[in-house]
């Protein structure tokens, strides 16, 4: 089929800015009303340069939004038990409202045990089993931030998901799996694809909505995008390249996220919004 459209871009940078502005307004209102400032604890194990950069970025964005951050840098030799103790203490600390454990934490640590030491009411990164279950059952709780950002983009561009076929490429615990559950909750028919999926192209060709969450440059071919489809590319690869062949996909899709400036900026925005939500809930309930 010949190209039929030039897709509209889904502007994650602009939407993320508005979400952060709203979080800043709400953080200021909480500080005025309660005398306490929303606080995000960031926990970093080791000194992996990418992780150091991510945490620094999250803390600096927090500060700009009027959220204080408490940073805990632990040596690479930290054991699972020590990390669990640290996260447990932060969970019990009334001065901390949200907890972010930067991951990956290193192969010698039981990451699941560490995540589970985060109290669900402070799990603003949406990494605990409790948060995943609540999200899957559409109960109150915090969602994994990148999937939450993808859903906010879909809402912003008024994409009606009911009855649509959504194909999610990738099934990681923080991205592919949760985004599929969130799409299902909005009545999409969801197909998950992963490294063992046979004939990815044929499945993508049937998709009304494509979410790419793999980490392989241009894995999703533009020619496989159904005309009029909505394409969200969470992938971020060297050279500012996504998981979707953007130039070709853009000639077929109706809506598409650019890389960078699409899904990427939404993650921190959702983290900050959820931190303010957590602070409001804890300070208003006195817990
Ligand atoms: P991940 O944990 O490595 O998971 C990748 C997924 O892709 C796995 O489920 C894997 O399948 C699947 N996969 C690998 N090769 C495939 C293939 N040839 N065909 C189909 N599926 C394949 O990665 P992640 O943490 O979910 O991150 C995915 C991408 O999103 C990365 O580019 C990352 O940088 C980006 N990301 C962006 C943000 C943001 O925008 N702020 C946040 C998080 C991640 P198996 O399960 O079978 O191994």
Image (cartoon, rainbow, N blue to C red):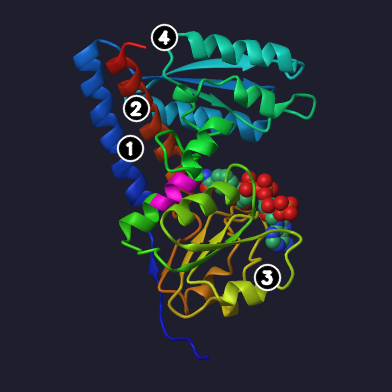
Q: Residue at x 64, y 32 (%)?
A: 103
Residue bearing the label numbered 1:
20
Q: Tell whether position 233 is magenta.
A: no
Q: Earlier in the sequence, mark 3 or mark 1?
A: 1
The answer to whether residue 284 is left or right of residue 67 is: left
Circle on res. 74: none
Residue bearing the label numbered 2:
276
Q: Earlier in the sequence, mark 3 or mark 2?
A: 3
Which segment is the magenta one?
147-151
Residue bearing the label numbered 3:
200
Q: Residue 96's quadrant in the figure?
A: top left
Q: Earlier in the sequence, mark 4 or mark 1?
A: 1
Q: Tell whether position 150 is magenta.
A: yes
- Whether 278 is drawn above or below 127: the answer is above
Of residues 241 and 280, the one drawn nearer to the viewer in this rendering: 280
Q: Residue furthest right?
A: 108
Which secondary structure is most common in the magenta stretch? helix
Q: Residue at x 47, y 80 (%)?
A: 227
Ligand 1 within 8 Å of disc 4? The answer is no
x%, y% of residue 271? 44, 34
Question: Judging from the image, what secondary structure is the residue with disc 2 in?
Answer: helix
Say which quadrant the C terminus sits in. Answer: top left
- Give the alpha-carbon distance from disc 3 to disc 1, as whole Å: 36 Å
């Amino acid at each position: 089929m010949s190209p039929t459209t030039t897709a509209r871009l889904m502007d994650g940078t602009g939407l993320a800015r508005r979400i952060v502005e709203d979080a800043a307004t709400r953080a200021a209102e909480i500080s005025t009303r309660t005398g306490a400032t929303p606080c995000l604890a960031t926990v970093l194990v080791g000194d992996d340069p990418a992780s150091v950069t991510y945490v620094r970025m999250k803390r600096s964005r927090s500060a700009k939004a009027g959220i204080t951050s408490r940073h805990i840098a632990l040596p690479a030799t930290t054991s699972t038990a020590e990390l669990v103790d640290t996260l447990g203490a932060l969970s019990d600390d009334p001065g901390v409202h949200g907890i972010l454990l930067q991951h990956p934490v290193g192969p010698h640590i039981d990451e699941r045990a560490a995540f589970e030491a985060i109290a669900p009411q402070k799990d603003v990164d949406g990494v605990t089993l409790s948060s995943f279950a609540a999200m899957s059952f559409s109960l109150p709780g915090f969602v994994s931030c990148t999937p939450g950002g993808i859903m906010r983009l879909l809402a912003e561009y008024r994409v009606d998901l009911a009855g649509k076929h959504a194909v999610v490429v990738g099934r990681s615990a923080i991205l592919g799996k949760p985004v599929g559950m969130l799409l299902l909750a909005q009545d999409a028919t969801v197909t998950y694809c992963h490294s063992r999926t046979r004939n990815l192209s044929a499945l993508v060709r049937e998709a009304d909505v494509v979410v790419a969450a793999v980490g392989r440059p241009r894995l999703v071919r533009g020619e496989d995008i159904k005309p009029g489809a909505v394409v969200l590319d969470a992938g971020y690869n060297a050279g500012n390249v996504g998981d979707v062949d953007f130039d070709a996909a853009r000639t077929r899709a109706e809506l598409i996220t650019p890389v960078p400036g699409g899904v990427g900026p939404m993650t921190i925005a959702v983290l900050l919004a959820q931190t303010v939500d957590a602070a409001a809930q804890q300070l208003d309930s006195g817990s």
